[in-house]
Image (cartoon, helix red, strand yellow):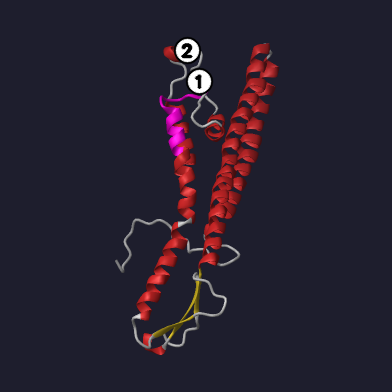
Amino acid sequence: MCSIFGYLVLLIVVKWMTDWNSVECQNDPNCQPPDLKAILIGMFMSPGHVPPENTLFRGQAVVQVILLLLALVCIPWMLLPRPLLLRRRHYHKIRYESLVPSSSTEEHQPGDTDDTVFVKKGEGAGDGDKPEKEFNFQDIFVGQLIHTIEFVLGAVSNTASYLRLWALSLAHSELSDVFLEKLIFFPLSSGNIVIVLVGFLVWIAATLGVLMGMESLSAFLHALRLHWVEFQNKFYNIHGTGRKFIPLTLKRSEEE
């Protein structure tokens, strides 16, 4: 996430802080505001190559290749360690229980593989009458694979969904330019006081009704939908496996 979308945030900040109207930039034909979407797409489609019109800083191609490799390495890193650690922990537990006399026994059923072990707890182990506990490495690996695929696809789709707020801001700015040009600049260029007055009144109505009313309501509904669908699904879901949402607070609890 940080190597891809965190890099996109960094590009946005660098683009904002660059003076594109400076003398040096005016004398350079390649010095123009780049398309950040084209940079992000080119990061995957043509790694190691950045066109001059999309270059924001020196060494950008090398940085993008390193970040892309980090993102690719994170996928097997999410997939492999948990099943392997659980398997190692389980076999360590089996070896320890085999040293305790009459406290635990291992029962191998016909057809069981090395990765499917049934451990039956005895009353001497202090666990009461718990049922047999099954460890299946294949099931854990497949479950972790599903979670990894879901996380990768969800990270891309959820982040892309939040980019619609960016698109709304761009549409808002374009509407503002159109209203200003057609309803203020054009009547002023005519020189007719009646046309100027009518254009000014229509501009006020369009600003209040469209920009401040409809656009604000649209942005609010989109943000609300994103909050409940993309954000809250981490805490509440249909399978009941979410985790409780704890808001950030700087106050120490009484227990601490």
Name the one closer to the observer, 158 or 60.
60
First in sequence: mark 1 vs mark 2: 2
Q: How many marks?
A: 2
- Residue 8 appears anywhere in the view: yes
Give percent across and percent down for residue 73. Answer: 46, 46
In reply to whether residue 55 is colored magenta, the answer given is: yes
Please, what secondary structure does the residue beneath circle 2 have?
helix
Please, what secondary structure does the residue beneath circle 1 have?
helix
Displayed quadrant of residue 238? bottom right
Name the one closer to the observer, 147 or 220.
147
Identify the main secondary structure in magenta.
helix
- Residue 14 appears anywhere in the view: no
Q: Are marks 1 and 2 in contact (CB under 8 Å)?
A: no
The image shows residue 110, relative to residue 35, as above or below, that is: below
Give percent across and percent down for residue 23. Answer: 43, 12
Residue placed farthest to the left in the image?
Answer: 256
Tell me which segment is drawn in magenta.
54-67
> For the residue marked with disc 2, what is the amino acid?
Gln
Displayed quadrant of residue 57? top left
Residue that numbered label 1 is attached to: 52
> For the residue marked with disc 1, what is the amino acid?
Pro
In reply to whether residue 80 is colored magenta, the answer given is: no
Residue that numbered label 2 is attached to: 26
Give percent across and percent down for residue 96. Answer: 35, 76
Along the horizontal axis of the image, is 32 left or right of 179? Answer: left
Q: Nearer the viewer, mark 1 or mark 2?
A: 1
- Give the alpha-carbon distance from disc 1 to disc 2, as whole Å: 15 Å
> Is the residue marked by circle 2 packed among few (<14), some (14-19), or many (20+) residues within 10 Å?
few
Residue shown at 42%/33% (left/top)?
A: 63
The image shows residue 65, relative to residue 119, as above or below, that is: above
